[in-house]
Amino acid sequence: MERLSFKVENQDGAARVGKIRLRNGNVETPVFMPVGTQGSVKTMSPKELESIGAEIILGNTYHLYLRPGDRVIKKLGGLHKFANWRRPILTDSGGFQVFSLGLANKNKKGLVKILDNGVEFQSHLDGSKHLFTPQKVLDIQNNLGSDIAMVLDECAPGNSSKGYAKEAMERTHRWAKEAKLYADKKKLQSAIFGIVQGVTYDDLRIESAKYINSLNFDGNAIGGLAVGESKEKTYHALDVVLPYLSENKPRYLMGVGEPEDILEAVEKGVDMFDCVAPTRIARNGTVITKSGKINLSNAKFKLDKSPIEKGCDCYACQNFSRAYIRHLLVSSEILGIRLTTIHNLRFMLSFMAEIRDSIKNQSFKKFKKSFLKKYLK
């Protein structure tokens, strides 16, 4: 079986519904991928994820490499078996975590060092030194048994000068070429995605899109967005980049998961999304509804007998009131954040299903307008 096949099945303007076939199952696009940083989507069991419709989840290469270790996971049968997840897994390269770690600790000299052949960093766990190269991150992801592996790239900050943005982009290109040659030579089982960089400079973005597309990866990702720039700049960057990315391969917008951003990106032709926000805000008591986000910890929900959202089929909405969930949250009961997480992920997955249906029915723009009118009111 080939590592990945992708077919566009329906289209409404540039918005499209497709199917990705992978070793461990099929994925309908546009798709939202819950993030399982440590090989676990926080508070959720694999069975629960399957029950709410998750077809693919994310694993974090940086964290799994440091603990318990990719070789340990390989000895235990790979990440699918280790985590008892039977469906596809996409793993990032770990590069974003390495660079964000360096930015978060910029006063600590030597924590992250960018070299021509990779990036040297210190573990946030014990300070030990490590080197990620384009080849090594693919080996790690191969040990994990990823269905989709991301290449090592340099995610330059959104406020980078054009000079630095160009330098980081060119380094990303060199690493991408090395990764592609290595994956082909080693006949790695994972599908490999390249990553477009260039911050918000149009000419750099176009240059990067053309180059990454020319390397003929299994799919193409757009990185370096949603890292501090305005939404308008993110949307503009997509307009600039997408015409240069192959239409017959999946297009993945990394780290983007707000409903309004997903709608804009889908309309432009993006297929895949991931974001920690739905699970992160759930742990603070915030839930996503079709009328916007609400924080259930607020006192006004103390006597509210209604579910989080009427009509929602998730376990939380079918069985508990806002008042009860608020009680759990203010009492620091673990069930509270489990219920808010279940709801938020079910919301996102149902939202994506509605997007797919609207594209199939040639009514995407109408759905987008109707959804945003209520969600952003």
Image: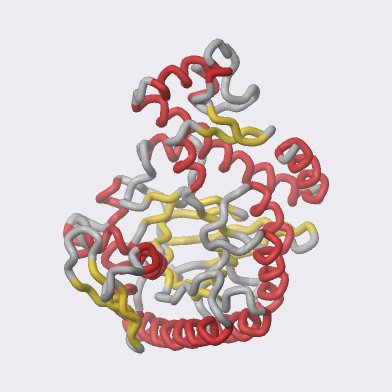
On the image, which quarter does residue 135 sit in?
Answer: bottom left
Q: Residue at x 39, y 67 (%)?
A: 103
Above or below for 322 versus 231 = above
339 relative position to 74: left or right: right
Vertically, is 156 above or below 12? below
Q: Position of residue 258 (x, y in %)?
A: 60, 49
Let me know if residue 9 appears in the view.
no
Q: On screen, 235 above or below 316?
A: below
Q: Residue at x 23, y 65 (%)?
A: 123
Give the quarter of the image for residue 234.
bottom right
The percent position of residue 313, horizontal first and vertical second, equals: 57, 27
Which quadrant would the C terminus be assigned to in this image?
top right
Compared across the picture, whether 73 is left or right of 234 comes to left
Identify the residue shown where x is 32% and y is 82%.
186
- Front residue of this view, candidates 251 and 292: 292
Residue situated in front as seen by the camera: 315 or 277: 277
